[in-house]
């Protein structure tokens, strides 16, 4: 019985196995094919930015192949980076981002520590509240905030609108809730034994935070910092609504409001500016991709 | 002499007790915790909760904000044709964009998942770039790609014999274009989330399905989708909020043109409230986002809690 069935079964199973292998190879090839198509779709705009930024105005306005640079030049880069106005935008953006990241972490980390470890009255409600605040978009808040600033000016005589540092007050509303939320998650994943041991050894709460929690949750801290930086660097609505003088603008708004003058579009410079504006987040992403992605996916998970 | 010494002794002990009580209070766990969360509470209360309710108050004032007019701003909006156009466009924009982002994200996540593990990092790295570039900057590149007279897309289309497409000149094409740009920016985020979800499905489940002779579709229907269900829901709901409240893309690409056909709530609120100087009406416009945002937020909270309980 066995002698008759085995010879028949073996070639059958072998060909079956072979076809599965075959299928798998083709599945992989098709995956690569479609991945390449998607990569082309996803990378066309940034690559087109680069192509245009290397062209002279003459080449841009002529009707030659737009996807090719015939006379590459760094003229746009030199002109833009030496322009005092563009430098001001860049410095404003850098200062706003650095200050906002610092204040965000100073507010978010202790709060996240308290909310995840030091249970107190209403701490669970507050944690949920932080998450809900993160879901309130800036497009809902900019009009009342605008009016609040105007009222504040009337009452105190301090002009906040049209000063670059008004962004230092506004951006934390976008960064702090999310950073607190993901830091709660990271802190909650630290074993309880660790901080219990520290407390037994006589460490204060502050020491437990700075000596144990921050070093252990460092990857989370980096992810949160990257998030805070990219959000403050990319923010467009608040500076567009709250600042108008060219010396007070941050980079994205500066490029859009000053390089587009009426109907005259200097596309070479606009694309150069856009590329330079996209560079800091891209550089950080290139070097710290894993942290960046960890921060993205952490938002949807609870501790 | 002794009297004086005793008195000074009593004084000093009294003095000592007060700070020690204060110190004990400061050392209490709940006090420390409260102090640590205080900046967060102040920030949220002053710059998020208060403005949200202030918007409600502003929306009931007249244009010069001198008089209470009740719901007049809202009833005025109901009579405006542009308002209904904005409602319609916001819904079309958000729903279509989220749908396509989810579909593309799902497909690309599977494609990346198919690739051998050591090569996934490289592909994932390239595919996430649209999400990393500040939206206002990448939309500028799209604006240039859609340029009426120098559109690089139309140049390619001309080579295969297709007439130039009025990407942002014609109302329907402009609506398509803003959705396209939004899908381009947002689908990498879905891809990353879905990829993380795919990786969390235990291999044993797939092996078991294979042993039981499940087809590709059955594996997808009964293993992959149920395991990813929660992440799919959270990501889509979260993206609905962000897309519904989107400002950057429409503002840079079309500014609401042609003929206000591409305005969404955020851009129209900006046009009316900040550029038009009618803050109460702008506040009223932006408040119309609240119902949809609330519904999405409630579902997210439910799903996240469920997810937290599973873990």
Image (spheres, rainbow, N blue to C red):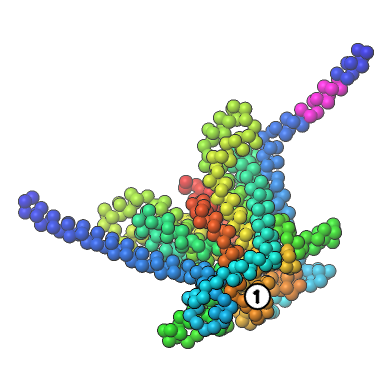
Task: Give B69 or A129, whichever is nearer the viewer.
Answer: A129
Q: Which residues are magenta?
A: B10-20
Does the segment drawn in magenta span residue B19? yes
Residue B76 as seen in the image, left or right of residue B14: left
* A255 shown above or below B304: below
Question: For numbered disc 1, what is the local secondary structure?
Answer: strand
Residue B46 as seen in the image, left or right of residue A66: right
Kindly tell me whether residue B209 is visible in this rendering.
yes
* A103 shown above or below A86: above
Figure quadrant of residue A61: bottom right
Task: Give A135 or B143, whichever is nearer the viewer.
Answer: B143
* A124 shown above or below A285: above
**Where is residue A67 drawn, in percent x and y?**
48, 76
**Where is residue B184 drawn, in percent x and y?**
50, 68
Task: Give B27 or B230, whichever is nearer the viewer.
Answer: B27
Q: Report the chain holding disc 1.
A: A
Residue drawn at point x = 76 percent, y = 27 percent: B20
Residue drawn at point x = 65 percent, y = 39 percent: A120
Task: Give A24 or A111, whichever is nearer the viewer.
Answer: A24
| Quarter in which the N terminus of chain B is drawn | top right
| Magenta highlight: main SS | helix
Residue B149 as seen in the image, left or right of residue B268: left
Does the segment drawn in magenta span residue B217? no
* 10 Å crowding of disc 1: few (<14), some (14-19), many (20+): some
Residue that carries the numbered disc 1 in the rendered image: A260
Residue drawn at point x = 83 percent, y = 26 percent: B15
**Where is residue A9 drawn, in percent x and y?**
13, 56
**Where is residue B205 drawn, in percent x and y?**
34, 51
Kindly tell me whether residue B177 is visible in this rendering.
no
Residue drawn at point x = 86 percent, y = 22 percent: B11
């Amino acid at each position: 019985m066995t002698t008759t069935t085995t010879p028949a079964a073996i070639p059958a199973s072998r060909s079956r196995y072979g076809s599965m292998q075959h299928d798998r190879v083709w599945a992989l090839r098709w995956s690569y094919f479609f991945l390449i198509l998607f990569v082309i779709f996803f990378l066309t705009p940034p690559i087109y930015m680069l192509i245009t930024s290397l062209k002279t105005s003459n080449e841009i306005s002529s009707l030659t192949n737009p996807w090719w640079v015939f006379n590459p030049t760094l003229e746009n880069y030199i002109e833009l980076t030496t322009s005092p106005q563009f430098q001001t935008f860049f410095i404003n953006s850098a200062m706003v981002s650095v200050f906002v990241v610092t204040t965000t972490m100073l507010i978010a980390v202790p709060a996240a520590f308290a909310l995840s470890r030091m249970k107190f009255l209403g701490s669970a409600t507050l944690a949920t509240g932080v998450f809900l605040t993160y879901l309130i978009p800036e497009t809902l808040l900019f009009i009342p905030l605008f009016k609040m600033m105007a009222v504040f000016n009337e009452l105190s005589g301090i002009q906040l609108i049209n000063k670059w540092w008004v962004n230092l007050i506004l951006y934390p509303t976008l960064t702090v809730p999310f950073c607190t939320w993901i830091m709660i998650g990271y802190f909650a994943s630290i074993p309880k034994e660790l901080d219990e041991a520290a407390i037994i050894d006589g460490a204060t709460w502050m020491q437990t935070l700075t000596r144990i929690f921050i070093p252990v949750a460092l990857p989370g801290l980096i992810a949160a910092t990257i998030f805070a930086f990219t959000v403050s660097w990319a923010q467009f609505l608040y500076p567009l609504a709250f600042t108008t003088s060219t010396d007070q603008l941050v980079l994205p708004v500066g490029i859009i409001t000053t390089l587009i003058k009426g109907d005259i579009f200097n596309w070479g410079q606009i694309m150069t500016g856009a590329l330079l504006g996209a560079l800091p987040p891209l550089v950080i992403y290139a070097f710290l991709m894993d942290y960046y992605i960890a921060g993205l996916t952490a938002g949807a998970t609870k501790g | 002499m002794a009297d004086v010494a005793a008195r000074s002794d009593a004084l000093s002990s009294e003095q000592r007790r007060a700070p020690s009580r204060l110190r004990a209070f400061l050392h209490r766990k709940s006090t420390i915790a409260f102090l640590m969360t205080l900046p967060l509470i102040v920030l949220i209360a002053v710059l998020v909760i208060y403005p949200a309710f202030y918007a409600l108050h502003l929306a009931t004032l007249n244009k010069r904000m001198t008089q209470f007019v009740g719901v007049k701003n809202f009833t005025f909006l109901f009579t405006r044709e542009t308002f209904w156009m904005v409602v319609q466009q916001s819904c079309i924009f958000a729903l279509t964009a989220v749908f396509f982002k989810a579909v593309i994200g799902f497909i690309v996540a599977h494609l990346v998942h198919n690739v051998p593990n050591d090569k996934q990092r490289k592909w994932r790295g390239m595919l996430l770039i649209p999400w990393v570039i500040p939206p206002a900057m990448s939309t500028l590149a799209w604006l240039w790609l859609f340029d009426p007279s120098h559109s690089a897309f139309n140049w390619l289309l001309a080579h295969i014999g297709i007439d130039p497409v009025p990407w942002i000149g014609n109302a329907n094409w402009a609506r398509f274009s803003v959705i396209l740009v939004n899908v381009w920016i947002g689908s990498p985020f879905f891809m990353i989330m879905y990829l993380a979800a795919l990786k969390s499905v235990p291999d044993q489940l797939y092996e078991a399905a294979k042993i039981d002779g499940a087809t590709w579709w059955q594996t997808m229907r009964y293993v992959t989708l149920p395991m990813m269900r929660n992440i799919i829901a959270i990501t889509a709901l979260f993206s609905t909020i962000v897309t519904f409240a989107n400002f950057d893309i429409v503002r840079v690409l079309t500014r609401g043109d042609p003929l206000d056909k591409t305005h969404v709530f955020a851009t129209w609120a900006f046009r009316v409230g900040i550029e038009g100087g009618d803050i109460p009406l702008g506040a009223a416009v932006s408040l119309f986002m609240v119902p949809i945002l609330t519904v999405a937020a409630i579902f997210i909270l439910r799903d996240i809690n469920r997810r937290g309980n599973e873990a």
